[in-house]
Image (tube, rainbow, N blue to C red):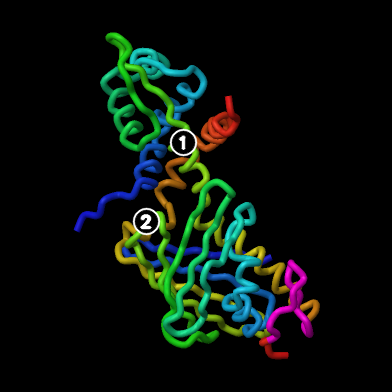
């Protein structure tokens, strides 16, 4: 099975996400653009995905919400330029951190009937990039995660 | 240009320290505690513990109130819950999304003439053969 590679080099405000799919380029492009398909895969399985707005054309808006029934996390942005497998450009903003907007470009490359999907995201600052990828947080918390898991399990149980 | 850290960054910053996580765990176990009670299991002075409490309070993870001369720390579970549910790492988010996309692409290719959706509706059929 293919693996999602995420690179966030120090000192530059970029995130690059690369993934290979065992499907032709046009089909992968459809899965990234057709709203009926997007809702079926984007986001963690444990959250419900609600596609509020999805206008895959130059100047079109998009917005979706992940919800666990109690909390909601909204994301929105705008598509720029014509969308094609050679380039799908959009802005991206997490509504929990308004004003921190990234510019994302997806390109799909044919490789003998398989497809390499590459997303290049440009943030306004390295700090904003780091906040998104949660570098420091993930590393700093590793050792205490088991303890924290137990604590959270107790908190989740009403007294 | 200095940007104001958003609330979640403040919470994550507060949780990034093992002593502070241990303090939260003790408050979850033992109810409201004084600085002295919290400092006891740590090889740390009370002022050092107080500094940690201040960070936790600033992140909304605990509140503090006075009982006569003692100052009690109280766990604010909601702040921690908010952070916990957002503990989906960027890597995990995309790993899981792409694994689901693998499965979707396999389904679409297994039935190329009429890709079916999970809810049973047909797609708009724009895909090339």
CA neighbours of label 2 inside 10 A, class few (<14), some (14 to 19), many (20+): some
Residue B126 in which image quadrant: bottom right
The residue that mark 2 highlights is A97
Left-right relation of B97 to B27: right
Q: Chain of mark 2?
A: A
Which residue appears at 37% of the width and 35% of the height?
A: B60
Task: Give SS at disc 1.
Answer: helix
**Residue occupying image coordinates x 39% and y 18%:** B38
Chain under disc 1:
B
Residue, far left: B1
x 40%, y 43%: residue: B12
Residue A158: percent from left, percent from top: 58, 28
Badge 1 is on which residue? B78
Residue A43 in which image quadrant: bottom right
Tell me residue B111's x, y (percent): 80, 79
Q: Is residue A157 above or below residue A140?
A: above
What span is in magenta? B112-125
Please say whether residue B95 is visible from this viewpoint: no
């Amino acid at each position: 099975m293919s693996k999602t590679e995420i690179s966030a080099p120090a000192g530059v405000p970029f995130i690059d996400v690369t993934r290979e799919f065992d499907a032709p380029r046009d089909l992968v492009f459809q899965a990234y653009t057709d709203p009926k398909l997007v809702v079926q895969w984007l986001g963690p399985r444990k959250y419900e995905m609600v596609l509020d707005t999805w206008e895959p054309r130059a100047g079109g808006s998009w917005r979706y919400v992940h919800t666990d029934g109690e909390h909601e996390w909204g994301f929105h942005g705008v598509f720029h330029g014509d969308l094609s497998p050679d380039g799908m450009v959009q802005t991206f903003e997490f509504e929990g951190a308004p004003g921190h907007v990234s510019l994302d470009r997806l390109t799909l490359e044919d490789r003998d009937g398989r497809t390499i999907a590459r997303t290049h995201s440009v943030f306004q600052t390295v700090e904003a990039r780091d906040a998104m990828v949660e570098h420091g947080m993930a590393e700093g918390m590793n050792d205490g995660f088991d303890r924290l898991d137990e604590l959270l399990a107790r908190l989740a149980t009403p007294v | 240009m200095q940007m104001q850290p958003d609330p979640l960054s403040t919470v994550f910053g507060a949780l990034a320290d093992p002593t502070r996580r241990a303090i939260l765990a003790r408050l979850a176990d033992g109810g409201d505690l004084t600085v002295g009670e919290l400092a006891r299991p740590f090889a740390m002075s009370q002022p050092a513990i107080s500094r940690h409490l201040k960070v936790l309070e600033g992140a909304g993870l605990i509140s503090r109130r006075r009982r006569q001369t003692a100052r009690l720390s109280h766990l604010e579970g909601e702040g921690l819950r908010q952070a916990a549910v957002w503990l989906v790492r960027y890597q995990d988010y995309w790993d899981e999304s792409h694994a689901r996309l693998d499965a979707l692409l396999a389904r679409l290719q297994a039935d190329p003439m009429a890709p079916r959706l999970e809810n049973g509706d047909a797609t708009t059929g724009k895909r090339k053969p």
